Amino acid sequence: MQTVKDINFEGKKALVRVDFNVPLNDRFEITDDARMAAAVPTIEKILKDGGAVILMSHLGRPKNGPEHAFSLQHLVNHLGNITSANKVLFANDCVGQQAEELASNLQTGEILLLENLRFHPEEKKGDDAFAQKLANLADIYVNDAFGTAHRAHASTSVIAKYFGENKCFGFIMANEVANAEKIMAQPEKPFVAIVGGAKVSDKLLILENLMNVADTILIGGGMAYTFVAAQGGKIGNSLFEEDRVELTRELLAKAQEKGVKLMLPEDSVCADGFTNDGGVETWNSDAIQDGWMGLDIGPKAVESYRNELINARTILWNGPMGVFEFSNFQNGTKSVADAVTEATSKGAFSLIGGGDSAAAIKTFDKVDEVSYVSTGGGALLEYFEGKELPGIAAIKNSTENA
């Protein structure tokens, strides 16, 4: 697996696919620069070697070509502040004459930021000619955008073939792959997986795949109630996928067959509506009264889940335990975060699986107390589902076979 550590970029121009899909406020100011900050080590390695950096990314979901709200120009000043670049230039398109001239004249120690890739529909279509135009801008291709690694887009997978052996992973991609493989290849036992979220259908494949490696799977979030209902429990108005009942029964049977302990929350903190301002009651998860819905795991579940986690040696967390954005229903997710960090302090390896889990660990100020927080939500999920990610395969397979 070739990374930026293996390449000397002196005198070279590196085209780096980053994930700068950062949130902006109504004044187009960055409200969370975590994704940009994460890419800095890769950028700095190239600059310190004596190379020049051309950055390409998407931002938001533009519908019909260029939109000012989704312009990467909003990021230029901040990029200059967080890197050691002599100069940060901006191309008002990612392809075309201006981009080509700026790239051609780019000097050592400088950064060129290209305009939003998704202003061109060819990006998401994986258009070959568009990928080649991007490739012509540089000598070396670096993919450091794990969050888009599951997309077969022009800038994430198609482009790689135009660089021969002159391509590699950035530090983010290398770390993501190494940490994910640490979980799925040879995890130290006991391995406890925490899987939450709203729907069983969203986590079906990851649950099936985890049953091959995990010792215990803790279920939380809205998806838990389809499991409870499948066992004949009374779940009131809780989230429920009627068309997934048989499937959850099959998952429960498969867990038993494989000797995996699949745990459902014994009790739930419930609301009389999807709001933080209504009534709050705690019921056994299989005896929730009509008119009430489970929005968090209850105190009994918190205790039993904690007991599993503090003795774990490997932990994967993907999905919150409840609606942690509501203060009355965040205790389950916070308690799980506390247990994960406690286990980590005792030597466990803990990987937080992007998306809402990463948001939760950040909300509770626990980022520095776990082993690794993934930058990729959907990408990590597909990796744990056992799928080959196009952005990884485009570099890994070809460099290994070279």
Image: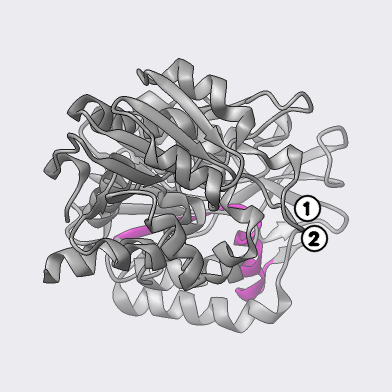
Question: Which residue is denoted by mark 1 in the rendering?
Answer: 293
Q: Are marks 2 and 1 in contact (CB under 8 Å)?
A: yes
**The residue stretch that appears in magenta:** 215-233
Given residues 263 and 17, the one toward you in this image is: 17
Residue 337 shown in magenta? no
Disc 2 to disc 1, how far (Cα)? 6 Å
Q: Say if 332 sits above or below 3 in the image.
A: above
Given residues 196 and 10, the one toward you in this image is: 10
Q: Is residue 325 left or right of residue 339?
A: right
Q: Is residue 182 left or right of residue 160?
A: left
Q: Position of residue 57 (x, y in %)?
A: 51, 46
Amino acid type, mark 2: Gly
User: Which residue lies at the image location 64% right of the left edge and 34% below the top edge?
Assistant: 23
- Quadrant position of residue 18: top left
Given residues 27 and 122, the one toward you in this image is: 122
Q: Say if 17 sits above or below 8 in the image.
A: below
Crowd rating for badge 2 (residues with CA inside 10 Å; few <14, some 14–19, many 20+): many
- Quadrant position of residue 359: top right
Q: Quarter of the image for the C terminus: give it.
A: bottom left
Question: Which residue is denoted by mark 2 in the rendering?
Answer: 236
Q: Say if 23 sits above or below 169 in the image.
A: above
Q: Quarter of the image for the N terminus: give it.
A: bottom left
Crowd rating for badge 1 (residues with CA inside 10 Å; few <14, some 14–19, many 20+): many
